[in-house]
Amino acid sequence: MRDHTKLRAFELADQVVMLTYQITRHFPKAEAYGLTAQMRRAAVSIASNIVEGCARGSQPDYLRFLEIAFGSLRELHYQLTVARRLGYCDEAGFIEGDTIMLEAEKVLGALIRALRRN
């Protein structure tokens, strides 16, 4: 078993969750079951899959859950750009989200590549 709290990828994923909830809090009420819910699910999925992967005993399972987390992260990053283009997210929120998501993608991607080499 791995300790997810020791992973930089998890720390960043947790920050992404908190930031996503802050950003989507100001979305129109009409988006409650649309983009707001989708972004929140994707954000929680990132951190949750890292945690679940760490709880798995085998390296292939661990890698599979990290790959799912990476996919959710890329999905959320796209959704943030949609929110900005629709005017739901101000420029400051977009820049903050974009910055943290890019860093998370780099860190999680590097972890995945390192595990694939082993």
Image (spheres, helix red, strand yellow):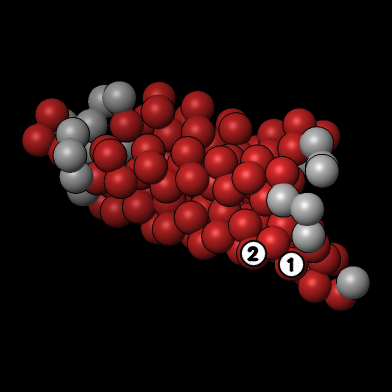
Q: Is residue 45 visible?
A: yes
Q: Residue at x 30, y 24 (%)?
A: 25
Say left or right for 85 vs 45: left
Q: Is residue 8 visible?
A: no
Q: Amino acid at mark 1?
A: Pro
Query: In whole angstroms, how far apart are the C-alphas of marks 2 and 1?
Result: 6 Å
| Label drawn at residue 69 | none
Q: Secondary structure at mark 1?
A: helix
Query: Which quarter of the figure has residue 26?
Result: top left
Which part of the image, by quadrant, shows the N terminus?
Answer: top right
Front residue of this view, candidates 6 and 58: 58
| Label drawn at residue 60 | 1
Q: Residue furthest left?
A: 30
Front residue of this view, candidates 65 and 100: 65
Q: Secondary structure at mark 2?
A: helix
Say left or right for 86 vs 56: left
Query: Which quarter of the figure has residue 31?
Result: top left
Picture layout, residue 33 above or below residue 79:
above
Picture layout, residue 67 above or below residue 102:
below
The percent position of residue 76, horizontal first and vertical second, equals: 43, 51
Q: Residue at x 27, y 38 (%)?
A: 36
Mark 2 near mark 1, Cβ–Cβ under 8 Å? yes
The percent position of residue 23, horizontal first and vertical second, equals: 37, 30
Q: Residue furthest front?
A: 57
**Badge 1: residue crowd in 10 Å (few <14, some 14–19, many ≥20):** few
Say left or right for 41 vs 52: left
The percent position of residue 58, horizontal first and vertical second, equals: 78, 60
Q: Kindly identify which residue carries mark 2.
A: 64
Front residue of this view, candidates 20 and 33: 33
**Badge 2: residue crowd in 10 Å (few <14, some 14–19, many ≥20):** some
Q: Amino acid at mark 2?
A: Arg
